[in-house]
Amino acid sequence: MKKRVTQVLKKHLGEDFVLEKPKDLSFGHYATPIAFSLAKVLRKSPMVIADELSKKFEDETIFESVEAVKGYLNFKLSDEFLNEYANFVLENPDRFAKDENDETILLEYVSANPTGPLHIGHARGAVIGDSLYRIGKHLGYKITTEYYINDAGNQIYLLGLSIFLAGKERVLREEVEWPEEFYRGDYIVDLAFKAAEEFGEDIFKDEKNIEKLSSWGKDEMMELIKSNLKDVSIEFDNFVSEKSLYEKWDEVFEKLKANDAVYEKDGKVWLKSTLYGDEKDRVIVREDGRPTYLAGDIIYHNDKFERGYDRYINIWGADHHGYIARVKAAVKFLGYDEDRLEIVLSQMVSLLKGGEPFKMSKRAGNFILMSDVVKEMGADALRFIFLSKKSDTHLEFDVDILKKEDSSNPIYYIQYAHARINQVFEKSGKSFADVKDVELKNLDEDSKNLLFTSFLLPEILEDAFKTRSLQKLTDYLKSLAAVLHKFYNEHRVIGSDKENEYLKIFAITAISIKTGLSLIGIEAKKRM
RNA sequence: GUCCCGGUAGCUCAGCAGGAUAGAGCAUCUGAUUCCUAAUCAGAAGGUCACAGGUUCGAAUCCUGUCCGGGACGCCA
């Protein structure tokens, strides 16, 4: 809809104008303050300019009126246009708000260490990533999702060691001296018992088995993580193992050397990341020859760029923000355009329950488990709350409030709007198809408003995706539901002389809500 | 000390590629149901947009500085 309007405006106003939605719909459906910016150039008052410009639109059937008000140019869409667009949506409900884009995107998210279950912080990134994927795909982008498994390095050894020691202590009932660093939490003990079942208790007698337990434990944890994700309807296209990438280390290292990106000092190899805006140079190979974590990420990003996507999006926890500069520097050293790599940060989450801090799970070693929260409030509510706030700001919420089944819970509010429409259709004995060909004309303001608001989905999606601001979609769904509820309270549908017109508009609204909800991973209910 | 995020209604937050009277939900108060689900709606009340300068016809929005809160500043991942 916005595209059509933009096209018509370009014809008369040129390329350069800002199209906005007036705060008050009574001004019009769209507006532009172009006269203000032209005022300086033309040395005329904005009012006069707007007045002159408005006359240019007299022959456009898409608008019912184009008015100049206090320097603004306000556009009201015509019934003719709205009806035509409504027909288009009802003919192709599955294609509503779909678009075509050639851009290919590699979206990496979650990528939590396979050393324990997912916690609430991971969940936020997971939900944002998944919804970005759903929306992007709907808009036609070719998106691949990927999970980077940190299965190399010290933390995997620590996992194996923790299981080993827990086995000694709890299965073999031996005295154990715990090191300073290890994974706590009852899930480690569970793993120890499971390992005893699978390999026999003797596995805890020889330290040589730690490696085996590491690898086995990592696989167990990946399965657990996948099932945590599945509980909120998230699946990945690819899983990439850090360990397997090291085969390419020599090759990548040569490339860095060839591009004069590294030097040796104190027996270590450093990346000259300072040259590209990092605070200091970073070690990528230690004195003992073991590559650092950054080395793995360099290989990984080299691998990503070799696969030739147009754009790379990483969703990271905000505690990694200091890491951005060095990875971008590495990408540049590898000869790729670092602007194609975009990092979306997901900030910290604080949870309350009944006004008190949400209890941390002893099972997880004092983290708030994603699975506990899902159990507490349900996947839909969790998804919704995470998506309704900007990703890069702190978020605090109370699970008890999101659990209530009334207006304080936006999900029920939206679901109820969708259910109401379906119940009206059911009561009327008609289907969407029955009202498809009804002509909408002489629409009253309320009808027009509901129809227009329902039509906004495509432009909202585009805006939300391009700015990576998914709260725009949840906000929109709330406001669309509000317009529907208001309409419902003020107009009787069944039995009115406009029954079929109203039903047709309701059908459009339902399609918009259902489509919007599906893109944030929530199924629209037909009855509540 | 450096960097990142934030400071908008009692609470949780939108708005911030400058634009019409700063919004929503919750909480508080008042009202609406013989009628398609009241899981709803209508209305009231609630604001020095942290502070101070600057740019502009116009600033919550952009720039500078200050204050306050959170986070990051590993050869951990």
Image (cartoon, grey):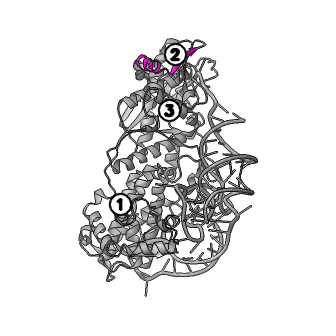
Read off the magenta span: A249-264
- Tell me whether circle 2 and circle 1 mark residues in contact (CB < 8 Å): no
State the residue position of label 2.
A290
Q: Which residue is found at the position 53% from the left and 59% from the top?
A: A404
Which residue position is annotated with label 3?
A328
- Mark 3, chain letter? A
Tell which subunit mark 2 falls on. A
Residue A232 versus residue B49: which sits nearer the camera? B49
Decide which of tag 3 and tag 1 comes sooner along the chain.
1
Q: Mark 2 vs mark 3: which is more N-terminal?
A: 2
Residue A60, percent from left and from top: 32, 72
Q: Nearer the viewer, mark 2 or mark 3?
A: 3
Residue named by callout 1: A3
- SS label for mark 3: helix
- The front one of A484 and A352 is A484
Is A258 magenta? The answer is yes
Query: From the image, which quarter does the N terminus of chain A lie in?
Result: bottom left
Q: Quadrant of residue A250?
A: top left
Q: Does residue A193 sit above or below A528 in this rendering?
A: above
Q: Residue at x 39, y 27 (%)?
A: A303
Mark 3 Cα within 10 Å, few/some/many (few <14, many 20+)? many
Amino acid on which the number 2 mark rests in the picture: Arg
Residue plotted at (49% across, 71% down)? A72
- Residue A75: x %, y % from top left: 41, 71
